[in-house]
Image (cartoon, rainbow, N blue to C red):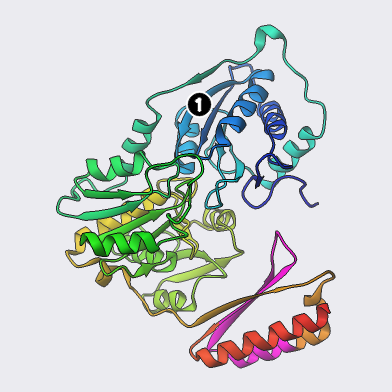
Amino acid sequence: MARKYFGTDGIRGATNASPMTAEMAMKVGMAAGAYFLRGDHRHRVVIGKDTRLSGYMLESALVAGFTSVGMDVVMVGPMPTPAVAMLTQSMRADIGVMISASHNPYADNGIKLFGPDGFKLSDEAETAIEALIDGDVPLVASSKIGRARRIDDAQGRYIHFAKSTFPENLRLDGMRIVLDCANGAAYKVAPSALWELGADVVAIGVTPDGTNINDGVGSTAPQALAETVVASGADIGIALDGDADRLIVVDETGTIVDGDQLMATIAASWARQGRLKGGGLVATVMSNLGLERHLAAQGLGLVRTQVGDRHVLEKMRSSGYNVGGEQSGHIILSDYATTGDGLVAALQILAEVKRSGARAGEVLHRFEPLPQLLKNVRFGGGKPLDDEAVKAVIAQAEAELAGKGRLVIRPSGTEPVIRVMAEGDDPGQVGRVVDRICDAVRKAAA
């Protein structure tokens, strides 16, 4: 059954418009609080947020909802999504909440929920909470209303945790690192962690004003980072997104290094140390075929999932992998975290660069990506991928690319769009294949 409010990563939308209203946030607090009231102990929820102006409004509404059903609330202020997951677990909380729309513009916001184990909620739990949102949640007696408090040392706790993932025998002395925090949730913790490890930190995207999150900075806009790396003569650049669960790197020349190259670097390092589990890594269907070939040459495997870090994590947990992620920079290292953590992944990359003694560009460019082309075809209605003519064109394209490339065709989960992606050794062939399929989809949807 399709869910009404929850998408692939919590509830998200433009603020002060359904579903991202203060009223909805209060209902989410009431519903999620009621769902997790289990046992006679004092129940607790940890709430963090990024730097969006609307975070104050949604935080207050969530606090009202949770306390009204008897949950105590701990507010930690602007913190990365993975920090909220970590604190939920370490504080023995019953639920964690992150108020963020990740890499979206400031006018959007979202609500992500974590269970007591620090993992994002299952589809079943989200469906049950949706039913409570639309139902009548009983309020507790006035004597049992929850209490709310802010804690001041949450940032220090996360910094300590992040630093603990960095090898004890290494320091970042002598490395100049440009760090772009996207004017988002990591604007304090990430520069502090790198400085405490000895780095010379040049920080950008660390002056949030409520409306400038992800605005021309961060992992989805790495040009400012690249320019600063070159201008400052830095050794490497690190870019996080608004809630710091995503990472993109640029080398000393300003060349962008995407998630595929970063995962390849970490997998090779961990395999060399005997730490890699599962005999490879987990990525999505969007990761480049060059990554798959590169891993195979080292005797490592690549398991692919649907797009979305939650699908990657599910496969990692079910099949025993400890490295996974997406080309976009969501990198999950399950030895350390229950979700993508941009800072923790960055520290693994920095450790490998430092350990090698080589320049970042030499260490991080592990393989030559195959030419890849993605086009979107918008349609008015129906199911164009079920059309026999479209199926025939796709089958012909798959046969043409066999052994030389790869084809991924999928409908968007949020809009009436068919995404057509192909990659292969011959860029001309890739372009022709994509155009033929797009033309067939347009005709079927006409």
Amino acid type at circle 1 is Met
Residue closer to the observer: 304 or 70: 70
- Quadrant where the image shows the C terminus: bottom right
Please tell me how crowded label 1 is: few (under 14), some (14-19), or many (20+) other residues with Cα within 10 Å: many
> Residue lying farthest top?
143
User: Which residue, given by chain and number where applicable, does mark 1 sit on?
Assistant: 75
Horizontal relation, residue 395 to residue 344: left or right: right
**Quadrant in which residue 174 is drawn:** bottom left
- Counting from the top left corner in percent of width and height, residue 357 is at 16, 64
Q: Is residue 161 visible?
A: no
- Counting from the top left corner in percent of width and height, residue 296 is at 42, 77
For the point 70% across and 42% down, which residue is it? 126
Which stretch is magenta? Answer: 393-422
- Counting from the top left corner in percent of width and height, residue 307 is at 60, 63
Q: Is residue 437 visible?
A: yes
The reply to whether the magenta stretch includes residue 418 is: yes
Picture layout, residue 138 above or below residue 441? above
For the point 33% across and 60% down, which residue is it? 270
Picture layout, residue 443 above or below residue 255? below
Residue closer to the observer: 116 or 214: 214
Picture layout, residue 312 above or below residue 391? above
- Counting from the top left corner in percent of width and height, residue 428 is at 53, 92
For the point 63% across and 88% down, which residue is it? 433
The reply to whether the magenta stretch includes residue 39 is: no
SS assignment at label 1? strand
For the point 48% across and 70% down, which residue is it? 302
> Residue lying farthest left?
174
